[in-house]
Structure formats: structure tokens, C-alpha cells
Amino acid sequence: MARFGSITLVVLSAALSGIVLWWNMAIHQTPIPGSTEELEQVDAVLRASRDGMHGDLPWRMQRLFPEGAAFSYALFGLAHCQVAMRRPMGDRGIQLEEARWSMDGLRSERVRGGFPALLPPGHGIFYAGWSALLEGSLIEASGVEDPLEVSLFRQHCDTIAGTFAAAGSSFPASYNGMAWPADATVAIAALALHDRLFPDRYDGTVSNWVERVRAETPPGEGIAHAWDPDAGVVRTPMRGSSMALMCVLLPSIDAELAKEQFGIFRKEFFAERFGVPVISEFPKGQRGLGDVDSGPLILGAGAAAMIVGAGACRMNGDAFHDLEMSSTTDGFGFVFGKEERTYLFGAMPIADLFIVWSRSRSVSNPVQPARPMFLRFHLWSTVLMFLIWAPFVWRALRKKRRRVLRNQVVQ
């Protein structure tokens, strides 16, 4: 029995050592942001997601959190649009086809019916914002101005603009009595996209929103995580996951506000755990528990903030931290496959969709970053490997010493 226990302990130690070695190698395998190799990996993740998306994946995600299906369709469609934009017009067929299919899914009554029908601008700002952003992205990626699609997109943008004009704050509600500033940011990004594609129509709405956000956000603080739309006050202060999402979109809305908020994001949420660069969910000096927005937290860091935070770095010209955060995701994400690529053994496909949504974007800073060395992480890994195997080495040395002493006694 003792021998069986010893063998089991050796096997477990070997398995843990293998995982540590895997982490130390995988963390160096992430392609340079914007490279052809990265785009090939994005394609591979999208290929792996297609069967699930055309099956029950959106509804499995819906069972996990209230916007699971809507997020699945929106991210899948937007990622295909962004991949299409990085290809010649004649090579965009499959991407545009999947993006249109995603748009149909997002517009379906089954998805739309999960949001309050009478809440302006029609099913609340979350649903309206993501839908309009996908509509505009599809028009941009296709390069064809279908009059019906353009009219529908503009109609939805008009409704969104009217909602902001009538709202008592910068952040209209996503559900009755509940608002999240990140949802409003998505909707404003859709208006900004419209004005990049067509003559300025919403410039006043966008600039007014930027000024109201500045007025409602204390100097030196990030935009709030949750908002009370009735009282017009902060419900939950800034958080890493929502700051990451807003910092992805703010550069397309207002460069100065984006710079301010990204600076706060880096200062308050960039951290390190045992040599691993991470993005924490709570600002420096604060602690809290994970929830449906952040996902599970490990030592205060969440996957949502990490994955989307890499995209925030990309869109704000911080190529080094984009690569660093993406490398952390790849190093600890147990990613497998070449032609079809999945993370976490395919257990949480919504994470894969957020990854491709972030990495399919064009790089705003074309300068190739230096590769992170992760020296402190490798040092901590060496310490861990020593702790794993030190008892076995100590035991072997003790046995050897006892044999030597017995031999000396016999002689």
C-alpha cells in the first residue's frame, strides 16, 4: 500500500511538472500582433467555432449569463467582418456569409425577445448597440452599399441617437432600471462607425456624449462599471473587464478620451502574479469577488479582462502589452489545434469568440514589439519545480546516507 502511494505521488508530481513546463513553453508561442500567422490562428479559432455556432453554442452560453446568445452572435459576426477587412475584396466570401448569418441570428425574435421590448431605443441600449455595430461593420466589410441595409442601419442609429438625446445621463438603460456604461460605449461606437462610412450625421451626438462622460466621471478615475439610469449616479465604480471593453472602442469615438481612459486602465489594472502579467478586475488596493461580468477570478485577475484587455492595448497603440497579455492567455489557456483551434479544451467557447474579436482587429501601431521574456515567471517556475521534486531528492539522499552508515557499521 505504501508503495502504491509513493508511485501515485511520483505520477502526480510528474504531471504537475509537465503542466509547468507546458506553461513555460506555451507562453512564448503567440504570434506578433497583426502578423499573417496571427490571422491564420484567428481563422482556425473561427473554424472551430462554426459548428457550435450553427448548433446550440449560443444557447449554451445563454444558460450561463443573460446576454450569452446575443454576445455569441455579435462577436462571431464582428470577428468575421474584421477578418474580411484584412483581406482583398475578392477573398471575403466566407467571412461575409458568416457575418450575415450572425446578423440574422442576432435579429431573431428568440434573441431579441430576451431584452425589454419597450425600453428605448428598442430592447435597451445593449441590444441596440451591438446590433447596430454589427450592421455597420457588415456594410463596411462588404464594400457594397445595399440601400435596404444602409437604410436599416441609419434608422437604428437615428433611434440610438434619439435615446441619448432624451436620456438623463450618458448611459441609457440596458434593462429596466439597470445600465452599464460599456453598453452605451458600444452604441456610440456604432454611431461613430456610421459617420466614418457616410457623411457626418451623428457628430453632435458623439461629441456631446464625450463631454457628458467627462462631466460624470471624476478626474483621474475610469468610467464606471455600472450606473443607475434613474438617479444618474454610479452604482459600481470602474472594473477591469468593462474598462477593457470600453478601451477597445473609445479610440474610434474620441482619441483624447481614449488616451485618458487607457492611461487610467494601465495604471490601475495592469498587474503581475508570480511573474505573470495580468489585468486585475479591481483597481489597485481593492479586492472583490468574481461575477457574471468578470468570470472567475484567480488571485484577483479575470480571463475577461485579460482577453479583452489585449485588444484594448492593440487599439491604443500599445503593441508590447497586447503581445504580453495575449501570450499569457495562450500560455495558460490550454490551446490546441492547428486547422481548428480551441482554448480550455473547448469548455468555454465564448472566451474563444472574445479572443478572435480582439485579435482579428488591425494593429493601430505597425511597429513590431519586442517579445516579452517572462524572466520572473521562469524564475518562479524553477522555484516551484524545486519544491515539487525536493522531497524526493531529500528522501533519496537520506536512503543513500543510511546505506553508507550501515556499511560502515558492518565493516
Image (cartoon, rainbow, N blue to C red):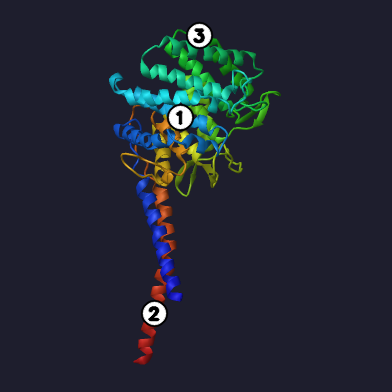
Q: Amino acid at mark 1?
A: Leu
For marks 1 and 2, the one nearer the N-term is: 1
- Name the residue rendered at 51%, 35% in the picture: 59
The answer to whether 70 appears left or right of 166 in the picture is: left
Q: Which mark is residue 75?
A: 1
Label 2 to label 3, Cα distance in Å?
A: 84 Å
Question: Residue 401 got which mark?
Answer: 2
Residue at position x 50%, y 8% from top? 201
Cα distance between the residues tagged 1 and 2: 63 Å
Residue 317 visible from this viewpoint: no
The residue indicated by pointer 3 is 201
At x 50%, y 12%, the residue is 154
* Residue type indicated by callout 2: Arg
Q: Residue furthest right?
A: 231
Kindly state the secondary structure of the residue where label 3 is placed. Answer: loop
Q: Is residue 130 left or right of residue 364?
A: right
Q: Amino acid at mark 3?
A: Arg
Give the label, 1 or 3, closer to the camera: 1
Seen in the picture, residue 386 relative to 292 is either above or below; the reply is below
Q: Looking at the rendering, which quadrant does residue 337 occupy?
A: top left
Q: Does the CB distance between marks 1 and 3 fall below 8 Å? A: no
Classify mark 1: residues with Cα within 10 Å, few (<14), some (14-19) or many (20+): many
SS for dot 1: helix
